[in-house]
Amino acid sequence: MTAILLSTLFLSIGFLAAAAMAATWQRYGRKALALRGELDACSEWRKVRVRINEVTVRQQATVLRPDFKRPAGRPAKQPALAAA
């Protein structure tokens, strides 16, 4: 009985995955196939000009340095519990 239920579960998940892939291909398939032509039509070089008008620092950063020093002394040993 468990084998039938598990196989039914796996088959239904497989059908759902296949349906999701088919829906994605139907929606975006043509754009994906046309992408190669669009990329070939683009030029290989592109000029970009950037102009920086002003650079400002709004807030100073706080630098936290952790204290890596060892503690001053070891804690005292606790006496062993007496057996009851």
Image (cartoon, grey):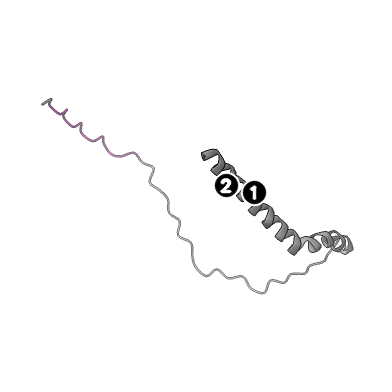
Mark 1 residue element = helix
Q: Quadrant of the C terminus?
A: top left
In the image, residue 58 lies at what x, y percent?
Answer: 52, 70
Mark 2 residue element = helix
49 or 39, nearer to the observer? 39
Give the residue at x 78% y 60%: 29
Per the rendering, the mark at residue 52 is: none
Check residue 80 for magenta coloring. yes
Going by the numbered disc 2, the residue's amino acid type is: Leu
Q: Residues within 10 Å of mark 1 (few under 14, many from 20)?
A: few
Which residues fall within the magenta stretch? 70-82
29 or 16, nearer to the observer? 16
9 over 38 or under it: above or below? above
Say which quarter of the image contains residue 21: bottom right
In the image, residue 70 lies at what x, y percent?
Answer: 34, 38
Going by the numbered disc 1, the residue's amino acid type is: Gly
Give the residue at x 85% y 59%: 36
| Alpha carbons under labels 2 and 1: distance apart | 9 Å
Per the rendering, the mark at residue 14 is: 1
